[in-house]
Amino acid sequence: MTPFHSDEYYGPVKRRLDTESEAGGRMPRGKKHFLALTSAISLLSTLAATAFISGSAADISPAAAETAAGWVKYAGNPVIGGEYGTCFDVSVLKEGDTYRLWLSWRPKQSLALVESRDGMHWTGPPKIVLGPRPETGWEDDINRPIVLKRADGYHLWYTGQAKGHSWIGYARSADGIVWTRMSDKPVLSPDAAWEHVAVMCPHVIWDEPSKLFRMWYSGGEQYEPDALGYATSPDGLIWAKHTANPVFRPDPASSWDQHKVTAAQVIKCGDWYVMFYIGFRDSDHAQIGVARSKDGITNWQRHPANPIIRPGQDKWDHDACYKPFAIFDGRQWLLWYNGRRGGFEQIGLALHPGESLGF
């Protein structure tokens, strides 16, 4: 396989415009321009504070106004996409010296796998590992994965979409490549009033003390869900939704996430559960924020510097920054996200030195 060249210019590619992609993806509604970001920290200050992240000044983005709270976009962005069409909503594991990234590949309506030694340069083309299954009635399009590795193998929860609705399915694998679906039916369906027609974007962790899988998921509309719900399961198949769902909602007083909050990743960090999420000011413009909670359910505290990842004026992520997935590698945080300009999404990377996120 050949590597992605993340510093190469990729010309615009039209998004797949079939019925299900339009129903299940982020189709631009008009050609609005994102507000120009006018404040910037000097390039020299940015380099002095963060040059150790990648070891080269050429790898550091000078556009400090595109980030906050110590985050810096990788200057080689986007790192995945281009000739492969829209790639979005990822799940990442670091296994030894290798990063393994499962992505949603819109042209193939499938989940695919790429690998990397540094989290920046990825093998390609993506290898499809789970494809659509229209005969089930809910898996015309497969996307938005979360992969969890335990001693008993790999566990995958994913979004299945069909007929303007979304559900969540479950599969298992011994190697992260060959997957076996654990049910022909969804393991989570939109049956609560606030979930409307869609549950999607699962994130799952295993809680050893309680012997439970814990899931945070998005529910609501098909074109961008509205809020975040929470559920638990002893086996990954049978889930109990929290009675107080949704557990995280838009903030009506906010200028950037007052419309919708979706697509959470939740990580246990010391005594806190830290959540990276998407906030929408309207249906077409999104940025990335972070919040924390003592129990992962109640009393979420939004970071005072939110949003931490913001669109870049006239760049590949000009209109929206979606679906964060972060890993702390012992030295720094690496956060992958989807950037959209017009109808085309690609995957980029942001970096943060040290473990403290500055709450």
Image (cartoon, rainbow, N blue to C red):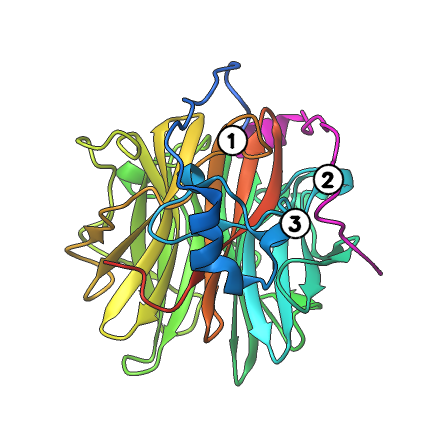
Circle 1 residue:
164
The disc, 3 or 1, on the residue closer to the chain's N-terminal end is 3
Residue at point 48%, 18% (across, down): 33
Side of 49 where 270 appears, left or right = left
Task: State the SS at label 1.
Answer: loop
Q: Quarter of the image for the C terminus: give it.
A: bottom left
- Check contact, mark 2 vs mark 1: CB within 8 A: no
Label 2 environment density (alpha carbons within 10 Å; few <14, some 14–19, many ≥20): many
Looking at the rendering, the stretch of residues picked out in magenta corresponds to 1-24
212 magenta-colored: no
Above or below, 309 against 356 in this view is above
Residue furthest out toward the bottom: 151
Q: CA distance from mark 2 to mark 3?
A: 9 Å
| Residue 314 lies in quadrant | top right
Amino acid at pointer 3: Val
C-beta proximity under 8 Å, tags 3 and 1: no
Q: Residue 96 vs residue 312: left or right?
A: right
Residue ID for mark 3: 79
Identify the image quadrant of the N terminus.
bottom right
Residue 172 lies, in percent from the top left, at: 59, 70
Extreme right residue here? 1
Q: Residue at x 67, y 26 (%)?
A: 18
Q: Secondary structure at mark 2?
A: helix
Q: Amino acid at mark 2?
A: Gly
- Estimate how packed mark 1 is, as few (under 14), some (14 to 19) or many (20 or more) residues with alpha carbons within 10 Å: some
- Residue 82: image tag: 2
Q: Is residue 17 magenta?
A: yes
Cα–Cα gap, marks 2 and 1: 27 Å
